[in-house]
Image (cartoon, rainbow, N blue to C red):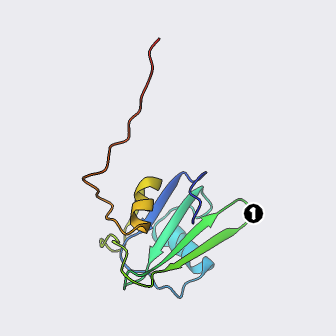
Amino acid sequence: MVEIGGTELVYLCCGATDMRKAIDGLAGTVEQHFRLDPFSRAMFVFCNKDKNKLKILQWDQTGFWLYYKRLEKGRFRWPEDADTMRGVSGREFRWLLDGFSLEQPQAHKAVKARFSC
């Protein structure tokens, strides 16, 4: 499983990405096309046109990680708005990996509880 701890934000490259791209090609896409820093503490996630493969690019201070996931059955519920980069929380990203939509009407909202003394 992909470790999300320490990651500030997860960016989804909406629409389809050419899965022949490796680390340099994906980092170039992040930097040149979306004007984001591939060396930041973020994960950049890309999906193919059939929505059954993901690539995740992540910098860890010494080099890039490139994760790859291929579904044997089913498809990811990937955002369609092509040529946009969408920031999501780690929670929303886990929903996507589990096959759910990013918009979960049944999910509980995050609570920021505070105690008063």
Q: Is residue 35 above or below residue 49?
A: above
Residue in the image at 41% along x and 56% along y = 88
Pick the residue in front: 12 or 74: 74
Pick the residue in front: 4 or 41: 4
**Which residue extends farthest bottom?**
20
* Mark 1: amino acid: Thr
Residue 91 x, y percent position in the rendering: 43, 54
Residue 104 x, y percent position in the rendering: 29, 56
Residue in the image at 56% along x and 61% along y = 37
Q: How many marks?
A: 1
Q: Is residue 71 visible?
A: yes
Pick the residue in front: 115 or 43: 115
Residue 109 x, y percent position in the rendering: 33, 43
| Quadrant, the N terminus | bottom right
Residue to which mark 1 is pinned = 62
Q: Is residue 9 above or below residue 21?
A: above
> Which type of secondary structure does the marked residue at label 1 adopt?
loop
**Which residue extends farthest left?**
105
Q: How crowded is the residue under tag 1: few (<14 C-alpha within 10 Å), some, or many (20+)?
A: few
Residue in the image at 34% along x and 65% along y = 100
Q: Is residue 91 above or below residue 82?
A: above
Residue in the image at 57% along x and 54% along y = 7
Q: Quadrant of residue 57?
A: bottom right
Q: Is residue 89 visible?
A: no
**Which residue extends farthest top?**
117
